[in-house]
């Protein structure tokens, strides 16, 4: 029982991070129909910026805010300067461009910050709370991870549902040409969308790094997991991305926790899930593809 | 618009077409399929750039017109089909159309400052009023995909009207509508013309003849006739363009029958 709780809670915590990363992919997919393979390197770059500030003596929280802000800037600038020319063109062009960015940013990180492993701090402890004389597997860090992702998602929902800018962003995502005719500055909305997505991606990068090591390619596995989570949820649905992230987090932790030598099977499991989803339900669990066609 | 020509890769889609929509008038644009009606419409919206000619709006020439400027200029357009945003409620769809009436700037709206908050409320109210005017307020919380086509068309029209335009561009508003709905639409267009000018592209001749003050007829990218409905109908070139002369004859009969109701 103790082990089950433990595995489940770890799964949910990791799942939240996958969910955040998947959400970043979905935000970009919805608005520009591009899978942003550079999301991981972009997030890693901001994590290194945070680490540099922390090493220079700033507090974790200042570093977090600066990292998220630079994530926004990075996302917005990349959309405006590099992605804009390939938007609306052949899909393959955009894929190649984001793959190129993925490699280029990773190389840039290695040049600027070095390619060695560096430990990344976490603002809270990783030891479980104690109730009476038993230690429960809820750690302050896991609460921080789950809480910060939930708050971010809440803010995004509020932005999209209740503000005029959110409305215009959704309109741009559903029909660029129509939105343009109604006076929406679609280009600006796309830039904003990329910026916001990069903030969410950057958050996931900082959370997964907390208490562990960072190196230029440390986000690579998260790209795979985040992508699987996004596809699981339908690539088109923000709620789907979150549910997909949680399902994947749980599934992977059950495999590594209960299957003999399961930790070696984690990556294979993720890819197996991806293949099964694409074969059985290519639209994902929460696909809105049918509604879209109407 | 005067002397508008458009060529797509050497194929001439429009040549030397001129058209003026007078304030408060309903101007019809008709012609057989492929005559260039939609192309001319797209030129008016900045979606297609003409290879020659001038577009003038309220005495100013519009150079390098961009679609997103349209609503600021006081021009609204509906699309062939409906073009509603599928994942947004009817009310939200209409709110997007009211965009130009928001006062708060981009950044205060983003940061949800108090002015922006008030804006959101205003937009919501405006959108509700526009829906009410078209009798679609009961659908405000529904998603467009779940509504019957004629209702969707009304919502699309509400979205165009909520911006309070001075010129309304209607692209085949009657397509897919039943006879009585089309009749209602005709009356609605006449009512609207008290507030704004209307440029109407439409296939249904009886509707066009009934509601329009002026008509321009295109055929194969060329303007073959222009004038009042009666003048256009009397024009032999128009009859010829439509081949089946009987179509126009029945329309004339139709017009005679409905002439009295037009100004009611």
Image (spheres, coloured by chain):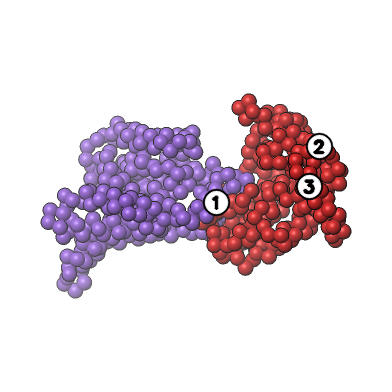
Chain colours: A purple, B red
Query: Does the image show residue B69?
Result: yes
Closer-to-camera residue (A252/B177): B177
Q: Is residue B53 above or below residue B111?
A: above
Residue receiving disc 2: B237
Q: Residues within 10 Å of mark 2 (few under 14, many from 20)?
A: some
> Which percent across, then down, holds residue B172?
68, 49
Residue A41 disc label:
none
Judging from the image, what secondary structure is the residue with disc 2 in? helix
Mark 1 and mark 3 residues within 8 Å of each other at the beta carbon: no
Residue at the image point whose x is 16% and y is 60% from the top:
A258
Q: CA distance from mark 1 to mark 3?
A: 45 Å
Query: Does the image show residue A18?
Result: no
Residue A171 disc label:
1
Mark closer to the observer (2, 3): 3
Residue at the image point whose x is 59% and y is 51% from the top:
B83
Residue at the image point whose x is 12% and y is 53% from the top:
A261
Mark 2 and mark 3 residues within 8 Å of each other at the beta carbon: no
Residue receiving disc 3: B246
Residue at the image point whose x is 19% and y is 57% from the top:
A255
> Which percent across, then down, holds residue B137?
64, 66
Q: Earlier in the sequence, mark 2 or mark 3?
A: 2
């Amino acid at each position: 029982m103790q082990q089950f709780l433990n595995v489940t809670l770890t799964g949910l915590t990791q799942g939240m991070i996958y969910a955040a990363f998947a959400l970043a992919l979905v935000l970009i997919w919805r608005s520009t129909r591009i899978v942003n393979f550079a999301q991981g390197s972009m997030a890693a770059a901001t994590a290194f910026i945070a680490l540099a500030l922390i090493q220079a003596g700033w507090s974790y929280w200042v570093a977090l805010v600066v990292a998220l802000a630079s994530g926004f800037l990075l996302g917005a600038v990349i959309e405006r300067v590099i992605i804009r020319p390939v938007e609306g063109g052949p899909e393959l062009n955009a894929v190649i461009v984001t793959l190129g960015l993925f490699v280029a940013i990773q190389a840039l990180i290695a040049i600027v910050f070095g390619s060695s492993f560096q430990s990344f701090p976490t603002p809270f402890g990783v030891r479980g709370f104690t109730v009476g004389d038993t230690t429960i597997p809820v750690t302050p860090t896991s609460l921080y991870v789950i809480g910060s992702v939930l708050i971010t998602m809440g803010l995004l929902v509020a932005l999209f549902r209740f503000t005029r800018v959110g409305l215009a962003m959704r309109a741009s995502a559903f029909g660029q040409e129509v939105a343009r005719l109604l006076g929406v500055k679609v280009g600006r909305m796309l830039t904003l969308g990329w910026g916001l997505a990069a903030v969410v991606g950057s958050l996931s990068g900082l959370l997964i790094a907390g208490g562990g090591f960072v190196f230029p390619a440390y986000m690579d596995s998260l790209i795979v997991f985040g992508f699987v989570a996004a596809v699981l949820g339908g690539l088109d649905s923000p709620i789907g991305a979150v549910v997909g992230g949680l399902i994947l987090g749980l599934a992977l932790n059950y495999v590594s926790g209960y299957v003999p030598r399961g930790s070696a099977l984690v990556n294979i499991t993720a890819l197996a899930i991806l293949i099964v989803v694409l074969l059985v339900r290519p639209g994902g669990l929460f696909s809105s593809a049918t509604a879209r066609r109407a | 618009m005067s002397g508008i020509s458009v060529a797509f890769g050497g194929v001439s889609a429009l040549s030397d077409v001129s058209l003026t929509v007078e304030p408060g008038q309903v101007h019809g644009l008709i012609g057989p399929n492929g005559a260039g009606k939609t192309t001319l419409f797209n030129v008016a919206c900045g979606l297609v750039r003409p290879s020659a000619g001038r577009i003038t709006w309220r005495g100013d020439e519009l150079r390098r017109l961009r679609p997103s400027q349209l609503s600021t200029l006081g021009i609204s357009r509906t699309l062939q089909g409906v073009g509603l945003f599928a994942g947004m409620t009817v009310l939200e769809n209409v709110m997007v159309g009211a965009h130009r009436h928001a006062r708060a700037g981009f950044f205060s709206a983003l940061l949800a400052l108090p002015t922006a908050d008030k804006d959101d409320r205003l937009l919501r109210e405006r959108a509700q009023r526009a829906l009410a005017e078209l009798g679609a307020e009961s659908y405000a919380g529904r998603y467009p995909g779940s509504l019957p086509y004629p209702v969707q068309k009304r919502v699309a029209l509400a979205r165009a009207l909520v911006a309070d335009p001075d010129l309304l561009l209607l692209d085949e508003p009657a397509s897919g509508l039943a006879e009585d709905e089309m009749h209602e639409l005709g009356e609605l267009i006449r009512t609207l013309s008290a507030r704004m000018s209307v440029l109407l592209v439409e296939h249904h001749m009886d509707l066009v003849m009934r509601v329009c003050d002026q008509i321009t007829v295109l055929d194969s990218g060329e303007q073959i006739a222009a004038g009042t409905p009666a003048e256009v109908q009397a024009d032999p070139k128009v009859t010829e363009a439509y081949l089946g002369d009987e179509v126009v004859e029945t329309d004339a009969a139709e017009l005679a029958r409905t002439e009295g109701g037009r100004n009611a």
